Amino acid sequence: ALEVLQGLTKQTKRPMLFASAEQNDQDVMMFCRLVGVTTDQVKIKGNVADVADVFNICEEIRPLCAVFDSLQAISQNSGRSAENIAHSIVEFCKRTKLCAILINHMTGGLVIKGGTGPAHYVDTIAAFEPYIPQIDGDPIEIFGKSVVVENQIVYDRDMPDVVVQNLRILRATVKNRY
């Protein structure tokens, strides 16, 4: 999500906001440095206790897009349901023309934390899923001859299957609500 925001700043020159309920500012900033995201245009707000705090920052800096990380934790921190918070975010976005990315976590048993209510308020549901060559096709055709991370090849035809098993695909389910 941070890298998406960074990419948007390069295209629009507008500020972006990353708000996290589970991490403090310093932890998010450390992760930004690790992935190469600069925080001159991507503003960080950690330890979000209530979504209203994020709305106040949005009113102040007028970002094009805001990420609400850990919706289930915002819910716990504020004592409101995740569905109620998602509804508040959608209403705020309609009023201010803000683009929002809501991140909600799942348990190890693949149960959505905080309930499925927020799914009714979003346009797309995306999840990282295991890459399955038999279903998804040849990774070379999909990812190219190699995937390079920090100048190290992490996959090519000669790599063991365990590497392929660790690949994840971001799958999106598009919801046509209108």
Image (spheres, helix red, strand yellow):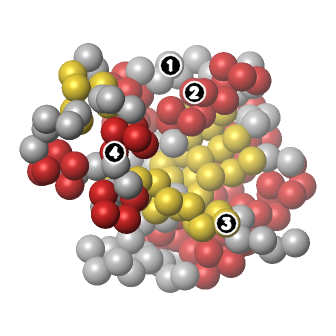
Q: Which residue is drawn at the image coordinates 47% and 43% (left, top)?
A: 46
Residue 15 position in % (x across, y down): 70, 27
Return the residue nearer the eye: 85 or 56: 85
Q: Earlier in the sequence, mark 3 or mark 1?
A: 1
Report if the CB atoms under discs 4 and 2 are less than 8 Å apart.
no
Residue 56 position in % (x across, y down): 72, 45
Q: Earlier in the sequence, mark 1 or mark 4?
A: 1
Amino acid at circle 3 = Val
Mark 3: give few (<14), some (14-19) or many (20+) Cα within 10 Å: few
Q: Which residue is mark 1?
A: 38
Between the residue at mark 3 and the residue at mark 1, the CA separation in whole angstroms equals 30 Å
Q: For the residues carrying marks 3 and 1, which lies nearer the camera in this image?
A: 3
Q: Secondary structure at mark 3?
A: strand
Q: Which residue is mark 2?
A: 6
Mark 2: give few (<14), some (14-19) or many (20+) Cα within 10 Å: many
Residue 64 appears left or right of 40: right
Report if the CB atoms under discs 2 and 1 are less than 8 Å apart.
yes
Between the residue at mark 1 and the residue at mark 4, the CA separation in whole angstroms equals 31 Å
